[in-house]
Image (cartoon, rainbow, N blue to C red):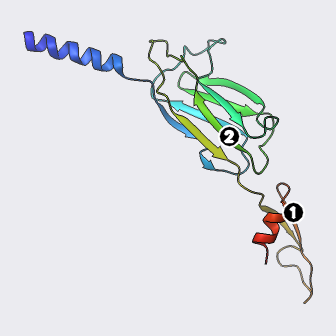
Amino acid sequence: MRNTFAATALLAIASWAHALQITSLSPQGEAAQVRQVVAKFDEAAVNFGDPKAPAPLTLSCSDAQAGKGNGRWISDREWAWQFENDLPPGVSCSLQVRAGFQSPKGVALAANSYKFNTGGPFVQQVRPGTYQRIDEEQFFVLQLNGPATLASLQSNVW
């Protein structure tokens, strides 16, 4: 009987000590054309439908203007930050757990930080296009998804 009580008490303490976890955060690493950040949790992080539910993460980007947007809860286990516009090339962002964030059960969110960046500009279109005739001394026009620096062009173009 005493062992059963001790095991039950230990199990209760262990489950109480469990921290709320982010099971998935996207994007991470390098990702082009970022419009939204989504965090998913292992259990209910808020009472769904609560319009005053706090954001679990704080976001900061190297380009503060590009990082503007709004956070919202999609469900009790999923939070999203929607940028006003697609992030341009060359922007890096970090997300930090908001200090003091707790689930409705009083479980604190495990402290982690996450980072992503949009990488450099990439070619979206080439003119003349595929299957069009070209001359031996043809010039090509490249349409990029953002501005390229002179240093980047000099080091990456043949």
Up the image or down, 5 lies above or below 88; here it is above
Badge 1 or badge 2: first in the primary sequence:
2
At 68% from the left and 40% from the top, the residue drawn is 93
Nearer the viewer's eye, disc 1 or disc 2?
Answer: 2
Which residue is pictured at 83% across the width and 59% down the height? 148
Q: Position of residue 156 (x, y in %)?
A: 75, 70
Q: Position of residue 81 (x, y in %)?
A: 68, 31
Within the image, what quadrant is residue 115 found in? Answer: top right
Q: Hey, what amino acid is under mark 2?
A: Cys
Amino acid carrying mark 1 in the image: Gln
Identify which residue is drawn at 49% across, 12% down. Answer: 104
- Please state the horizontal and vertical placement of residue 86, each as a whole percent of the image: 78, 43
Q: Which residue is mark 1?
A: 143
Which residue bears the numbered disc 2?
93
- View extreme (front): residue: 151
Q: Is residue 32 left or right of residue 96?
A: right
> From the viewer's perspective, is residue 111 above or below residue 101?
below
Look at the image and tell me in which quarter the N terminus lies: top left
Crowdedness of circle 2 by 10 Å Cα count: few (<14), some, many (20+)? some
In this rendering, position of residue 42 left or right of residue 140: left
Residue furthest to the left = 1
